[in-house]
């Protein structure tokens, strides 16, 4: 698979909690990769796992594992147990997504910026957040800004960690950053 999108639990579940996975399917069908560690984390919330299984059956995503002894497997183990000097231990889902994106090429989809940012910088990974995905969906005509604000509000209500209070604020913050 090329140009894969390697999702961690938080980013994917932001869409699952608000029944917005169709957005992901429309944008990235057949290119969404869930590390098996993320799939296992979703087993704790059976109704979210059911939604993932539907996406899997529809061919929108694949659940993939790492080969024991591979470079990505060793990178994963290092991130979850004994990180390099100056790096922190991170969760299994984030670590698996980073290792796979690094070794296979592709984009990491994660909202957990505090934990992953040093790894994203170190490995020069492409990275997107829930906000970036919603902006892409709006630009592609999949959703409107109003629908984006509704989804954003529902995600916040479901305790998803997002960078701003509204989708409109997120768009403005990106525009301000692009101007600089």
Image (tube, rainbow, N blue to C red):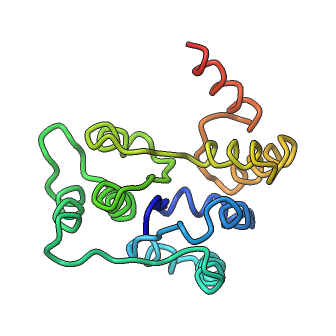
Q: Is residue 23 left or right of residue 87?
A: right
Seen at 50% across and 80% down, the residue is 43
Residue 129, how many percent across, how many down?
A: 55, 46
Residue 124, how many percent across, how many down?
A: 32, 40
Number of disc labels: 0
Seen at 85% across and 45% down, the residue is 144
Q: In this view, does 4 lie to the left or right of 158?
A: left
Q: Is residue 46 visible?
A: no
In front of the other: 72 or 9: 72
Q: In which quarter of the image is residue 88?
A: top left
Q: Can residue 65 be seen in this view?
A: yes
User: Which quarter of the rendering shows the C terminus?
Assistant: top right
Residue 134, how many percent across, how many down?
A: 69, 47
- Residue closest to the far front: 2
Q: In this view, does 122 lie to the left or right of 174?
A: left
Residue 38, how many percent across, how many down?
A: 44, 70
User: Which quarter of the rendering shows the N terminus?
Assistant: bottom left
- Residue closest to the far bottom: 57
In front of the other: 64 or 86: 64
Seen at 47% across and 76% down, the residue is 39
Q: Is 145 situated above or below 33?
A: above
Q: In which quarter of the image is residue 74?
A: bottom left
Q: Quadrant of residue 121?
A: top left
Q: Is 121 situated above or below 141?
A: above
Seen at 20% across and 59% down, the residue is 75
């Amino acid at each position: 698979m090329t140009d894969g999108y390697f999702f961690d639990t938080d980013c994917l579940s932001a869409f699952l909690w608000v029944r917005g996975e169709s957005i992901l399917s429309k944008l990235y069908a057949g290119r969404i990769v869930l590390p098996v560690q993320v799939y296992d984390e979703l087993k704790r919330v059976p109704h979210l796992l059911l939604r993932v299984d539907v996406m899997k059956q529809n061919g929108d995503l694949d659940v993939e594992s790492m080969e024991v002894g591979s470079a990505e497997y060793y990178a994963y183990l290092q991130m979850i147990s004994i990180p390099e000097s100056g790096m922190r231990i991170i969760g299994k889902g984030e670590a698996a997504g980073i290792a796979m994106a690094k070794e296979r090429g592709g984009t990491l989809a994660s909202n957990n910026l505090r934990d992953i940012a040093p790894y994203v910088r170190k490995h020069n990974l492409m990275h997107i957040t829930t906000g970036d995905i919603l902006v892409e969906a709006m630009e592609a005509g999949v959703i409107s800004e109003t629908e984006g604000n509704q989804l954003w509000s529902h995600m916040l209500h479901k305790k998803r960690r997002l960078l701003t209070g509204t989708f409109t604020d997120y768009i403005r913050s990106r525009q301000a950053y692009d101007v600089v």
